[in-house]
Amino acid sequence: MTPTIRDVAERAGVSVATASRVLTGSRKVTPDLVTSVQEAARTLGYRHNAVARALRRGRSNTIGMVVPEIGNPFFPAIVEAVERRLQESGRDLFLCDAQQDVGIELSRVQALADRQVDGLIIIPVSAAASRDALERIPHQTPVVQVDRFVEEYAADWVGVDDELGIGLAVEHLASLGARNIAFVNAKLDSSSAVQRYTGFKRAMARLGLPDDTQQLFGTYRAEWGRAAAQELATGSVLPDAVVCGNDEIAVGVLREFRRRQIRVPEDVLVTGFDDIRFAALADPPLTTVRQPHEQLAAECIRLLDARMAEQDTPVQRIAIAPSLVVRESTGGQS
């Protein structure tokens, strides 16, 4: 039979109220009572039901999070940073993978809402098609979008300034003498893909560089990077440099160039975006745009807590400036 708090109180020789205060930490009690109650709980195998207590208080102490695909190394980095922040306030994270499918994304959002999470953090799969999932979230559930956002949807958002980040990469390549700069990106389905493409076009125009260079669109995966590099390598002219929409694409580009004995950075310069853990371990180490994971997570939780405290406040959109990390793929030092 499962022991109850009454059983713990009887074994410790205290009242139920005192046992409850010890086990919940709601009020201070004398050290000898703490020792007595905790020893009784251990002996009986009593386990305090924190979830039931939280629900009685109208909170589950859980936050839901939906990411487009957990296989993309950038998203686990954000998840880890968010979870660390939540642990500081004693909250748990329920994580769901949308598998790059807006239908699955919708079902995951509904499942988290059914679990009565206190708030929801979402990195939308699509800038347009993810609207359906967001509109199914109960009105009373606070929502924060991170990294990506759904266009013209009134929910708080925090992410890096993607246009600025790509601009930093283009300016760096131009400073090294590159003019024929190719762009390899994901299809323009997500807000990040759109903003990075816009940033590339604007930076090229601002620097007076040709706007008719090769621009290829696929997925945010290394396999696409290899396919794009094959197309670039077999074209009439090899570009001076390649700006990649993320680090996974860039790693694929590097691998295919190496297979074809195209030297980086001697023959072509390559940059990425995100600064995932493996960027510095690429061959050669990858010049990339760094996203500040910890800062993104801190702002995300701050926005969520503010929204939980006050529903009727103006929507906030926070763009954090990224930084350029120069490594050997553009001639820098690791």
Image: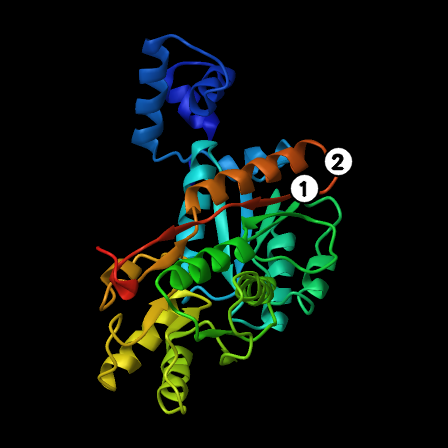
Q: Secondary structure at mark 1?
A: loop
Q: Position of residue 17 (x, y in %)?
A: 51, 17
Q: Image point 25% across, 86% down: which residue?
A: 260
Residue farthest top in this picture: 30
| Drawn side of residue 313 relative to residue 295, left or right | right
Going 74% across and 37% down the picture, which residue do you hit?
311
Task: Looking at the picture, tell me which residue is in the foreground, 267 or 144.
Answer: 267
Where residue 122 sits, quadrant-wise, is bottom right
SS label for mark 2: loop
From the viewer's perspective, is the residue at label 1 or at label 2 nearer? 1
Question: Do the residues under discs 1 and 2 have CB atoms within 8 angstroms?
Answer: yes
Camera-side residue of 306 and 11: 306
| Residue type at the position of mark 2 | Thr
Category of crowding for the residue at label 1, using alpha-carbon neighbours closer than 10 angstroms: few (below 14), some (14–19), many (at least 20): some
Residue 111 placement, left or right of 174: right
Q: In what quadrant of the picture does the C terminus appear?
A: bottom left
Instruction: Say if 34 sits above or below 321 in the image.
Output: above
Place of residue 221 in the rendered image (x, y in percent of width and height, measured from the top left)? 42, 74
**How did the renderer colour the structure?**
rainbow
Image spot of residue 78 (x, y percent): 44, 51
Q: CA distance from mark 1 to mark 2?
A: 9 Å
Looking at the figure, which quarter contains the N terminus?
A: top left
Identify the residue position indicated by label 2 in the image.
Answer: 313
